[in-house]
Every structure is written in structure tokens, then in C-alpha cells.
Image (tube, coloured by chain):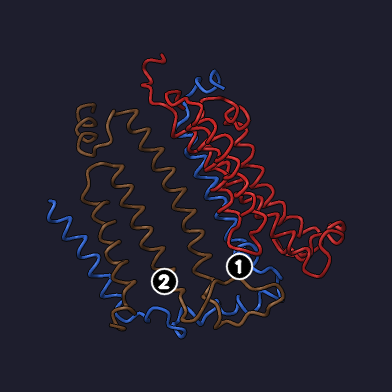
């Protein structure tokens, strides 16, 4: 059983290495991930939004719907923790 | 040697993936399974961050009034996506820990096999 | 959470040195999120770390009274409402949801002049909202996860 688990882990690593064989090198400027919309954000932030931190600009303005959903995820997680761990009739006396 | 350096992040991420999968599948303690899940998430986050690198690029923060040229900065998009992914992983960890605490309150243990035998004896 | 580690040195280091420094650094990360590495999520995590440190190490109840559980829920919901309300404010003057450039408040022009001043204020508003939401959620989760273990049967 333990050998099977180790085998599964090694198989995952081997699968990842095989899949990454044709990925671009580290720091390649012409990698497909680096020629898409990312450079557009860097070049247009100064005139579109005017704040210096490009990551904040993308997070809070270009992709603010994304961040809104993210905040809802956080909030849902907190509410889930609250409802899983709450004890009925006890918290009223404590606080 | 340059070839190895260019592929280095992928090998490290593969090791992290293996550690995470082994922790999630091979361990019997539920807390250790959760730690394995976190290691797996770290591997994915590092993979995206290493994909954002660009030779000669610096932190994507402009000087005031500077018009940014794309080749001077690393790609900011994976940073944004991984910032949100880290937040999701925090929420997932919190909810999982809450469930684990509830399980410990019900069964008195967080060991997988002991919980199963307890459930069978109860039913 | 625990009373076992009461000592003068611990009180001094935590109360006078560490917690104010951590909270100040969190506020710094929040207000400098537009010009340096930082932003809402990070600031919320740092502020929550300060609160959690004070709760875990000091046995006095000041932090627990100031940020009790119902108040933490209220803080979280206020953060969410600030975020969503900033988006809705842009709709009143005909813009899209979360399109900060058209927020219809005249006083913004006096604070941050220029074409992009409203975008600055909009970005800062939603970062404050995110900070409040993350801070409240993390503090609430750690508060519930860290309460001591008692079997339910003994409470009857």
C-alpha cells in the first residue's frame, strides 16, 4: 500500500516533467505566456489608470470583477467556518 | 549547464508535486493530508510565478509618470492570478481545519482508519 | 486563549513593541498599495496577524472585547458592502459596474485633482474593502478554530 502511494507520487512527478518538456525555458521573453495580454497591461496602465503598481492596477481595476468574486470566496469561507464550529446556545452566554 | 538552469524550476516543482501527492494519498492523518494539499498548491503557485519571468525584467512597478515598456518588466498577470489563488487556498485551509475540528469533536481522533472503524461501530 | 504564559516581559514585548509595529506596518502596506508592493489582501493578512498575536499571547480581554465575534462579522460585511457599493456608485452616472472613472462625487476633485483622480479613489476604496473583509474573516476563523477543546456532552 505504501509502495503504491510512493509510486503514484513518482508517477505524478514524471508526468509533470514529461508535460513540461516542451514548455519554454525559464525567463524566455518570447514565451506564449509573456506575449499575450500581460505586456498590454504594463504599457497601458500609466495612461488608463495612473497608479504605479501594475499588479494593483490589474487586480483592482482591469480585473475587479475577479477580485470581487475572490472577496466573496473569502467571506463564504469565513461564514462556513462559523457555521461548522458554532455551538448552539453557548456563544450567547460567552460573549 | 545552461540547459539545466533553464529547466531547473520545472524539476523543483515536480519534486514539490510529488511530495504533495504523497502527503495527500499516503498519509493516514487528516491534518497531514491537509498539509499535503497546501504543498501541492504551493507547487502550482510557483509554477505560474516561474512562468511570469522574463530575462532582464524587473518588478512590475513603474516610476511616477513613467511610461512602461513591456520588455523591462516581468509579466504582471500571473502575479495577480496567484495572489487570488493564495487567498483561495487560505479560505480552503480554514474551512478544512474547521471540518477537522468538528471531526475531532465528534470522533476524538483525526486518523482516517480510526474514524472509519468508529463509524462502522456506530452504525 | 491561554493564561499559562503570563509574564511582564511577554506583556511588554507584545503590547509595546510587536503588536503596534505589526498594525502600523499593515496600515502602511494598505495605503502604499498603489505605489509599492502591497495591497488589500496583504494588508488584511498582516493586520489579522497582529490581532491574532495579541490574542494568543496576552491574557487580557481588551482585544477580545474590541473585536468580538459579532463585530468581526460586521467588519467583514462592511468590507464587502464597501467593495460592492463602490461598484454601484459608478452606475449612478451611467457607467458600467466597477467603472471608477465616472464615480459621481464632486468632492473627489478637490482631494485628488486630474482626470484619473476618481480611479485612484475607486481603487483605494475597494482595497480598503478587501482589507476589512480579509481581516475580519481571518480573525474570525482563527478565533473559532483556536477555542479550547471541550466535549459537547459535558455542557448538557
Q: Image check: C127 left or right of B86?
A: right
Q: Residue at x 22, y 43 (%)?
A: B28
- Asked if residue C85 is positioned above or below residue A84 in the image, the reply reads below
Mark 1–mark 2 CB contact (< 8 Å):
no
The label on residue A58 is 1
| Residue C74 position in % (x across, y down) | 64, 37
Callout 2 environment at 10 Å: few (<14), some (14 to 19), or many (20+)? Answer: some
In the figure, what tint was chain C given? Answer: red
Q: Is residue B98 above or below residue A48?
A: above
SS class, disc 2? helix
Q: Position of residue C21 (x, y in %)?
A: 59, 44
Q: Which residue is mark 2?
A: B50
Query: Could you tell me residue C17's position as x and y percent?
Result: 57, 39
Circles 1 and 2 on the same chain: no
Binning the other alpha carbons within 10 Å of mark 1 as few (below 14), some (14 to 19) or many (20 upward) gives many
Q: Which hue belongs to chain B? A: brown
Residue A75, by quadrant, is: top right
At horizontal 48% and vertical 26% (from top left) the residue drawn is C7
Amino acid at each position: 500500500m505504501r509502495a503504491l502511494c510512493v509510486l503514484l507520487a513518482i508517477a505524478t512527478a514524471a508526468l509533470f516533467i514529461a508535460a513540461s518538456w516542451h514548455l519554454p525555458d525559464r525567463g524566455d521573453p518570447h514565451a506564449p505566456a509573456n506575449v499575450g495580454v500581460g505586456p498590454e497591461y504594463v504599457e497601458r496602465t500609466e495612461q488608463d489608470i495612473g497608479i504605479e503598481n501594475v499588479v494593483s492596477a490589474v487586480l483592482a481595476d482591469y480585473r475587479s470583477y475577479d477580485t470581487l468574486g475572490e472577496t466573496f470566496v473569502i467571506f463564504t469561507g469565513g461564514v462556513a467556518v462559523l457555521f461548522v464550529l458554532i455551538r448552539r446556545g453557548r456563544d450567547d452566554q460567552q460573549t | 549547464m545552461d540547459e539545466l538552469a533553464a529547466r531547473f524550476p520545472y524539476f523543483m516543482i515536480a519534486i514539490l508535486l510529488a511530495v504533495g501527492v504523497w502527503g495527500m494519498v499516503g498519509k493516514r492523518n487528516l491534518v497531514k493530508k491537509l498539509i499535503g494539499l497546501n504543498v501541492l498548491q504551493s507547487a502550482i503557485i510557483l509554477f505560474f510565478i516561474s512562468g511570469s519571468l522574463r530575462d532582464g525584467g524587473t518588478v512590475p512597478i513603474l516610476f511616477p509618470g513613467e511610461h512602461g515598456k513591456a520588455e523591462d518588466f516581468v509579466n504582471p498577470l500571473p502575479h495577480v492570478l496567484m495572489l487570488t489563488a493564495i487567498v483561495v487556498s487560505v479560505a480552503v485551509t480554514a474551512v478544512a481545519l474547521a471540518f477537522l475540528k468538528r471531526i475531532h469533536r465528534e470522533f476524538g481522533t483525526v486518523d482516517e482508519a480510526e474514524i472509519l472503524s468508529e463509524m462502522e461501530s456506530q452504525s | 486563549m491561554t493564561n499559562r504564559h503570563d509574564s511582564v516581559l511577554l506583556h511588554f514585548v507584545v503590547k509595546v513593541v510587536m503588536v503596534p509595529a505589526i498594525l502600523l506596518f499593515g496600515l502602511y502596506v494598505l495605503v502604499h498599495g498603489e505605489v509599492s508592493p502591497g495591497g488589500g489582501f496583504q494588508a488584511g493578512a498582516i493586520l489579522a496577524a497582529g490581532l491574532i498575536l495579541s490574542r494568543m499571547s496576552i491574557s487580557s480581554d481588551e482585544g477580545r472585547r474590541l473585536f468580538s465575534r459579532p463585530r468581526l462579522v460586521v467588519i467583514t460585511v462592511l468590507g464587502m458592502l464597501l467593495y460592492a457599493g463602490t461598484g454601484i456608485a459608478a452606475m449612478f452616472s451611467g457607467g458600467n459596474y466597477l467603472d471608477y472613472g465616472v464615480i459621481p462625487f464632486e468632492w473627489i476633485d478637490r482631494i485628488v485633482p486630474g482626470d484619473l483622480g476618481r480611479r485612484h479613489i475607486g481603487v483605494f476604496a475597494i482595497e480598503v474593502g478587501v482589507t476589512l473583509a480579509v481581516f475580519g474573516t481571518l480573525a474570525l476563523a482563527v478565533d473559532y478554530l483556536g477555542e479550547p477543546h471541550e466535549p459537547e456532552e459535558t455542557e448538557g
